[in-house]
Amino acid sequence: MLEKLINKFKSYELQARISQISRNIKQKNLTYLSCEKIINIEECLQDLKQNSVSGICLEAGIALGGSAIIIASLMPENANFHGYDVFEMIPPPSDQDDEKSKARYEIIKNGESKGINGKDIYYGYIENLYEQVVKNFESLGLKVDGKKISLHKGLFENTMYFTSTNSVAFAHIDCDWYEPVRLCLERIYPVLSIKGYLVLDDYNDYGECKKAVDEFLITHQNIVIIKSQGNLVLQRKSA
Ligand SMILES: C[S@@+](CC[C@H](N)C(=O)[O-])C[C@H]1O[C@@H](n2cnc3c(N)ncnc32)[C@H](O)[C@@H]1O
């Protein structure tokens, strides 16, 4: 009983700490992210503004667009947002992934997955998901114009390319399985700004996401862990 009350209080306390836009996104069931994870993202974006860190803000793994809309709404004024997703059913895990990931994918593939909070239709079953996401951005006052806000449809391996003139200030990597997480880290790292952030949504949820990140951290000692409760927050400290 007391534990229930304490948890309820904690949940109210976390809800009070997220921005109004994030509260709207949660109310509309547009994100899987907990308040704790959202707070970490909001703090990174605030820090980028305070330290004038330049570069684009991106998300790999959009689903209905919830966390993407939060990032695009709260990013530094001079930043652009880029979102990457297949905008259809999530691609399967690979042999590198664990049984939990494979079991989760089986449920999705068999049409048995529920929507966010057990409500609505699961995003992967929505026809024209890309158009739906564009509408979700619009419903929160943002236009996907291909300039300030761009969405790239397709597998990350075919859409996520950077040149040496690009820089990334913030990347939210939310794509569950080993291979896409590894690929995103590999592609983003060379252009990650100093003091820029990488946030790994599934580090504490899917074992093989953790494996991909831990392997990356061993070989990139200029990337340090800032937070590990909820999602994992990493920051680049030097060139
Ligand atoms: C957990 S959902 C993202 C949740 C979202 N960020 C939110 O606010 O709730 C993961 C997304 O990553 C996408 N995804 C996973 N692997 C991918 C890949 N290799 N290429 C493109 N999209 C991928 C899936 O289709 C799915 O939309």
Image: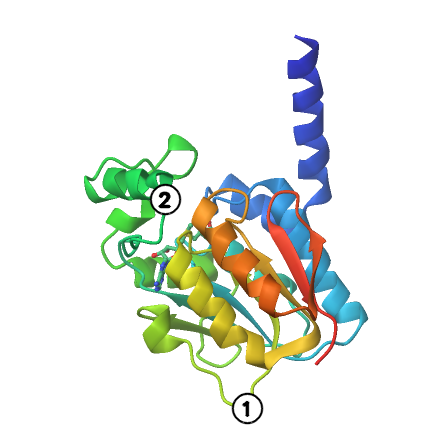
Q: Which mark is residue 98?
A: 2
The residue located at (62%, 49%) in the rendering is 38
Is the shortest distance between ligand 1 and the CB of mark 1 under 8 Å?
no
Q: Secondary structure at mark 2?
A: loop
Disc 2 marks which amino acid? Asp
* In this picture, residue 204 sits left or right of residue 195: left
Residue nearest the viewer, comparing 12 with 164: 164
Residue 70: x and y in percent read 57, 57
Residue 66 in view of the camera: no
Task: Check disc 1 and report the residue beneath it.
Answer: 164
* In this picture, residue 117 sits left or right of residue 55: left
The residue located at (66%, 78%) in the rendering is 193
Residue 229: x and y in percent read 66, 43
- Picture quadrant of residue 61: bottom left
33 in relation to 186, above or below? above
| Colour mapping used in the image | rainbow
Quadrant of the image for the C terminus?
bottom right
Disc 1 marks which amino acid? Ser
The residue located at (74%, 62%) in the rendering is 46
Q: CA distance from mark 1 to mark 2?
A: 35 Å
The residue located at (62%, 41%) in the rendering is 35
